[in-house]
Image: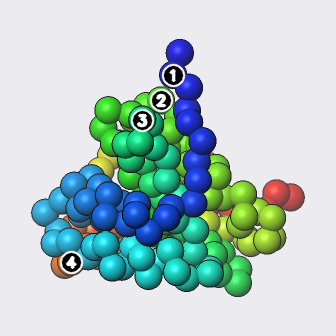
Amino acid sequence: MFVVPAIRLAQPQDAAGIALMSRDQIETDLGWSWRRDRVLQAMANPAVNVAVLQIDQRLVSFGIMEYGEHHAHLALLAVAPTHRRRGVGARLVDWLQKPAQLAGLEKIRLELRADNPGALAFYRRLGFEATGRAAGYYGGVVDAIRMEKNLRTG
């Protein structure tokens, strides 16, 4: 049985690892926009949570969520290939979702690469629904699928 370790807010020393994981797991073939300095800016923003999950002091997952007035935006989420399909990503999304729910936000929105059917299936399992497509969203190269999850019941 795989036990998922604790999730915590990222610290400045995590920024380089997050940036590399974004480059290698999310931004493949797109150019690299989430570099260390951008990750540090997100960490410094009081409306953003940057969360990490490490195993044996090795980064295996991270997520970046921005909380707005009416909705939250999941800017990035990555799970190392060696730790996918073990509940790591779902647990991280749940952790990031809780502040949005506590604040009474209506929805969580996100975009994902249209060429990533695994991510699409993952988010659907978590209750997200596709709301549209944005042509060339990622650097004019790859389309995005827009998704959202309603946080209000009833």
Q: Secondary structure at mark 2?
A: loop
Tell me the residue that label 1 is attached to: 2
Tell me the residue that label 3 is attached to: 56
Q: Residue at x 43, y 31 (%)?
A: 85
The amino acid on which the numbered mark 1 sits, given as a three-letter code, is Phe
Mark 2 nearby-residue class (10 Å; few <14, some 14–19, many ≥20) = some
Tell me the residue that label 2 is attached to: 86
Q: Position of residue 101 (x, y in %)?
A: 76, 63
Q: Earlier in the sequence, mark 3 or mark 1?
A: 1
Q: Is residue 116 above or below residue 101?
A: above
The amino acid on which the numbered mark 2 sits, given as a three-letter code, is Arg
- Give the total number of marks visible in the rendering: 4
Q: Is residue 94 left or right of residue 144?
A: right
Marks 3 and 4, how far apart at CA = 35 Å
Marks 4 and 2, how far apart at CA = 31 Å
The amino acid on which the numbered mark 3 sits, given as a three-letter code, is Asp
Q: Earlier in the sequence, mark 1 or mark 2?
A: 1
Q: Earlier in the sequence, mark 1 or mark 4?
A: 1
Q: Secondary structure at mark 1?
A: loop
